[in-house]
Image (cartoon, helix red, strand yellow):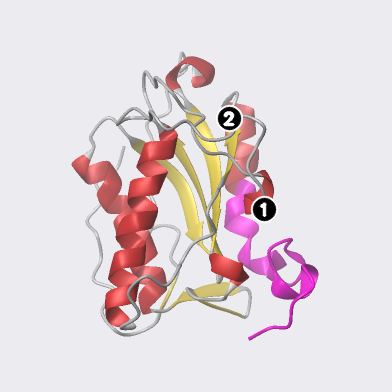
Amino acid sequence: MRPYTPFDGGASDAQYDPERHHRHTVRLPDFDYQQEGAYFITLCAYQRETLFGEIVDDDMILNTYGHIVLDEWMEMAIIRPSIFLDECIVMPNHFHAILFLPHIVDAHDVVGAHCRAPSARGINLSRTPQSLGSLIAGFKSTVTKQINILRASPGTPVWQRNFHEHVVRDEAASQRIREYIDGNPATWATDDEHLTRIGHTMM
C-alpha cells in the first residue's frame, strides 16, 4: 500500500486527483474479501445539498468542505492501522469509497438503501468500536463538527442519517466499483443523487 500524506486543503478550491487523493491496498492473490470485510459505501449530504464542490468539465472540484471530507477519510486509516482504504471520491453531494476492515466483528450496524431509508436490520445500539457503523458514525461526526465550525452553524446536519453499504465479494467486483467511482464525475448529470434526478431544484 502506498504511503499517504494528507494534503493541505486550505481555503482554496482544488481539482480531485485520483493519484493523489486515494490509496490502494496491496493486492494479495489469496485475499478473502468476504472474511476480511471489503465494503463499498455511499454517504449522502443532508437533503442532497451540494456542499462539497462542483463538477466542471467532468472533473470534481473540491471546495473547503470537500477537502475536509477527504482529509478526514484518509486520517481515519492513519489513526486506525487495521483499516485499509481503496478508491474513493467526494462528489458535490455524496461520497463513495471502498474500504477493508480485517477481522470485522459487526459490519451491519446502520444500512440505508441509497442513503434513503434504513434496512430491515435497523440499528444496533451496541456497536463494537471496529464495526463499520461505528467507524462511519465517527467519520461523519468529525466532518460535521469541522464544517459547522467553519460556517458558524453548530448543530446543523451535514449528512443524511443513514448510509448505503455493499459487500465487495471478490477482486472482479472491486475493480468494477473502482471504475464506477473513477467515472462518477463524468456521469454526474445522470447520477441518481443529482438533485434534478430526485425531484429537487438545484441550489
Q: Is residue 100 visible?
A: no
Amino acid carrying label 1: it is Arg
**Picture residue at 28% right of the left edge, 69% below the top:** 146
Which quarter of the rendering shows the C terminus? bottom right
Amino acid carrying label 2: it is Val
Secondary structure under the numbered disc 1 in the rendered image = loop
Give me the C-alpha separation between circle 2 and circle 1: 21 Å
**Picture residue at 49% right of the left edge, 33% below the top:** 109
Question: Which of the two residues, 23 or 117, is positioned nearer the viewer here?
Answer: 117
Q: Which residues are magenta?
A: 179-203
Q: Which residue is mark 1?
A: 116
Magenta highlight on residue 79 = no
Question: Please, is residue 148 above or below residue 72 in the view?
Answer: below
Q: How many marks?
A: 2
**Left or right for 88, reference 169:** left
Question: Which of the two residues, 76 or 147, is positioned nearer the viewer here?
Answer: 147
Secondary structure under the numbered disc 2 in the rendered image = loop
**Picture residue at 67% right of the left edge, 32% below the top:** 120
- For label 1, the crowd category at 10 Å Cα-Cα, with few meaning under 14, some 14 to 19 and many 20 or more, is some
- For label 2, the crowd category at 10 Å Cα-Cα, with few meaning under 14, some 14 to 19 and many 20 or more, is many
Question: Which of the two residues, 201 or 35, is positioned nearer the viewer here?
Answer: 201
Which of the marked residues, 2 or 1, is nearer the chain's N terminus? 1
Q: Nearer the viewer, mark 2 or mark 1?
A: 1
**Left or right for 76, reference 122:** left
Residue 103 drawn at (x, y percent): 37, 18
